[in-house]
Image (cartoon, rainbow, N blue to C red):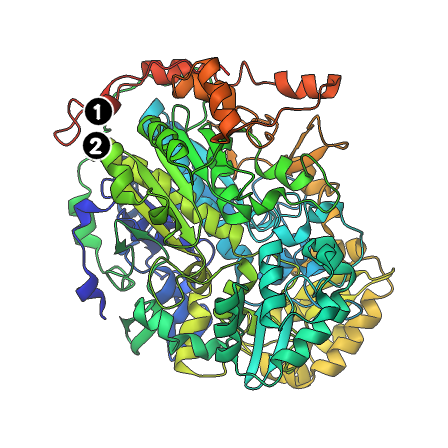
Amino acid sequence: MTPSEMAVEIDALPLAAVRVIDLTDGCGETAARLLADLGADVVRVEPVSGARSRTQEPLWGRTSIYYETHNLNKRGVALDFDRPSGKAHFLQLLQSAHILIEGLGASRLSESDIAPASLRERFPSLVIISISDFGNSGPYRTWVGTEAVHSALSSILSRSGLPGRRPLLPPGAMATESAALTAAWAAILAYYNRLESGAGDSVDVSVLESAVQVIDPGSGMAGSAAGGASAVDTPRGRPDVKHRYPIFACADGYVRLCILSPRQWRGVVAWLGRPTSLSDPALERLEARYTQAAQIDSILSEFIATKTRDEVVAGGEQFGVPCAAVLDVGDVFVAEHFRSRSTFVAVETAEGLLRVPNGLIEMDGLRMGVRTRAPRHGEHNSEVLTDWRDAMPDETEIPVPATPRRPLEGIRVLDLGVIVAGGEASRLLADMGAEVIKIESSRFPDGSRQSMVGDLVSPVVARGHRNKQSIGIDLRSRAGLELMRKLVATADVILSNFKPGTMDKLGLSYAELSQINPRIVVVQSSAFGCVGPWSRRLGYGPLVRAGTGLTAMWRYPGEVAGFSDMATTYPDHASARIAALGAVSLLIRRRRTGRGGRVEISQAEVILAQFADILALEALIPGSTEPHRDGRIPDAPRGVYPASGDDEWLVIDIRDSSDWRRLADRIGQPALAVDPRFETAERRVAHRELLDGIITRWTTSRSPREAVAALQRIGVPAGMMLRVADLLEDEHLRDRGAFTVAVHPLVDHPLPSENTPGHFTGVPDVELRPAPLLGQQTRAIAGRLLDLTPEQVDELLGSGVLEENLPPASPVGAEFESHGQEKTYDHQQRVHAERRVPTCAATEGTPWTRPRTDDQSA
């Protein structure tokens, strides 16, 4: 299928009225690409000499695969910033723009008299997103970052690789892509805030902080395999966690299993023929299985060894055991599932057709995919300068508020999300001011509430469900479903990440929900998408990684086994941000059209999109992912090196011969800088073993921080390997306010967790209301939104339709019950009462077009 066959009516896309200037170059270009996919008119501005990313690896002939995959759906303009006419044209574009995303840095922009600070004064309604390696403040602000450096500093490296071995750098550009995703999320929040408040914003986005927040936050939501413990609470070492998501060899490759719930364990026992060695009922508990992991894995290994991957996966599906084949990277192009979903599409380049992932989000059943190829240099100069001649009028004239506000104040979200991807998406909305009501039941509990030590509220729940309320409803009952329908009539957004088809079976399909409330925005996230041969599979992040080729890439080079992605929850947090981005994008469209819509996210396609350039190269040159795991040509010295101390490591990541010469001089080996054996990347790679020995002798005589500081002072990319706990004490992250520390009355220690996605000037730091117990606000919500009397609530609680859990009858419990709960929604009440929902022909006269006056006090 070609892009022309997937052409859509631009005006129907959610961001059709949004104009974006993309002034990035090699870092963050995906941010504007995401907005372009959603319909924004994105203009890529580059100098007359051409953007540096046009020559960025990987290359295909003279074409940068990176540039071609990161600039789809954009228009291109080339301006000479050294000439008055070029600056005048740029200012003309800014006058007409809503959002500017820049990644050039303050120094390069200041050289052209277009520094973000001055632009903010000149264009107060403009949203300016600035992306840089370490942010515009803090001790590391002048450091040089690369993907490897960010992996080390963000703690991802400390959780990658096998215990007792050298830590393993993850493949791809997950840190950089996380920053682009953060930038897109921040941009859409700030723009929505502009629509509500009339004020623009300046947002400082750091690649390092984005990697800490998005790839696998150690102080955030964790998978149910963690048993309620966050990574920050685990021992300092690199523990062996392969038992969480074990991989087994089979007749034609490898398969991965995720056995997390009691029901899944019972499926395993039935699948194995109910062996007496596994008959102990205690093994239904996760912690009991962990203590006997070696015995269980031995039995499973023998059972699986003679079967093919397809046979194992089919058996898992039959017995309800989450399972996936570990695909090699090249397998994704021929996999029936991805072919049926048109996951990949061919796009035109100067060298020929390039095979690329076709977007990563669907709206109203339509893929927000590739419409146009990446622009040629200066291709749209006259067209854009004509189109953007007049300023784009604001949708409304709103007085700018005197104090910062949260963008989503006045938005009500019904949260049916579970575990990481679901819980994280609603937490992102809650942090930004939305009223989030978690719908849950003890009959089908959220796996994130699982705790191996029996906590009422585990650290994972406390962090991942902060700022939410909870109502316990049995949606399998007719009365419970009717109560849910009444809540839908009052809501703006519904989030879920059940297996596709579950919402339909509950009587909560999008068609049924939109009949109740035509303005509702429904967001559904699943492992492999709502349609396709794999759509009904039980999905967890580890299975998604296996099914997209990422697990196969994430292993020690040259080793058949050695899989090393067991300690991460990726892509759950990235998928959650895509879901939140989709939700707010449809809220923006709703302002324009009066109608809601539905968003569907495939977590598998989130991974594929974030590895777009590497996958495109693999499609051209099978096997290229081994030497080009990060999208660059091989060079040396580059990698993980031991430092002084116990299990201490650092990354050195030279980019070119200039870096090499400075490095050689710094380590006291100036003769090596002019040694012909090391004058090119190819020659340095040929002598990698010799170079690594020289570098190791220097690094092992120094602490990681000492070595890194010495290298960063001369502009050589380097980073010390930080553990999760180290992040909380890191001088740069502390200076930047990357973490906010909450206290939960039912958790016996402080809870540091992430702050806002970037540093806003117009959005305050996140609130820290404590996460609820299951059904803690059932009575309050039932009275406030469902118009139930206390007697009716008692009756429904007695019949099991409603469910309630209250804090312990103690001073701590009393503190929890009152901690922010009454004042929580005072402001929300005023926002709802003042908000006037636009009336349109499709909704005129229906209850949800009237001003909301419901009592918000809890």
Q: Are marks 2 and 1 in contact (CB under 8 Å)?
A: yes
Circle 2 crowding by C-alpha within 10 Å: few under 14, some 14–19, many from 20: many
Compared with 557, 597 (above or below) is above
Indicate left or right for 748 with 207 as reference: right
Quadrant of residue 260 in the image?
bottom right
Compared with 535, 495 (above or below) is above
Q: Whole-percent x and y of residue 702?
A: 85, 60
Q: Whole-percent x and y of residue 644?
A: 86, 61
Indicate left or right for 512 with 802 as reference: left
Compared with 601, 655 (above or below) is below
Q: Earlier in the sequence, mark 2 or mark 1?
A: 2
Amino acid type at circle 2 is Gly
Mark 1 sits on what residue?
Answer: 838
Cα–Cα span, label 2 and label 1: 6 Å
Secondary structure state at the residue bearing disc 1: loop
Circle 1 crowding by C-alpha within 10 Å: few under 14, some 14–19, many from 20: some
What is the number of callouts on the image? Answer: 2
Secondary structure state at the residue bearing disc 2: loop
Q: Nearer the viewer, residue 388 or 498?
A: 498
Mark 2 sits on what residue?
Answer: 594
Q: Residue at x 65, y 39 (%)?
A: 138
Q: Whole-percent x and y of residue 81?
A: 35, 49
Q: Whole-percent x and y of residue 94?
A: 30, 39
Q: Residue at x 23, y 36 (%)?
A: 515
Q: Is residue 470 visible?
A: no
Q: Is residue 406 visible?
A: yes
Which residue is most to the left?
A: 841
Amino acid type at circle 1 is Pro
Q: Nearer the viewer, residue 113 or 817?
A: 817
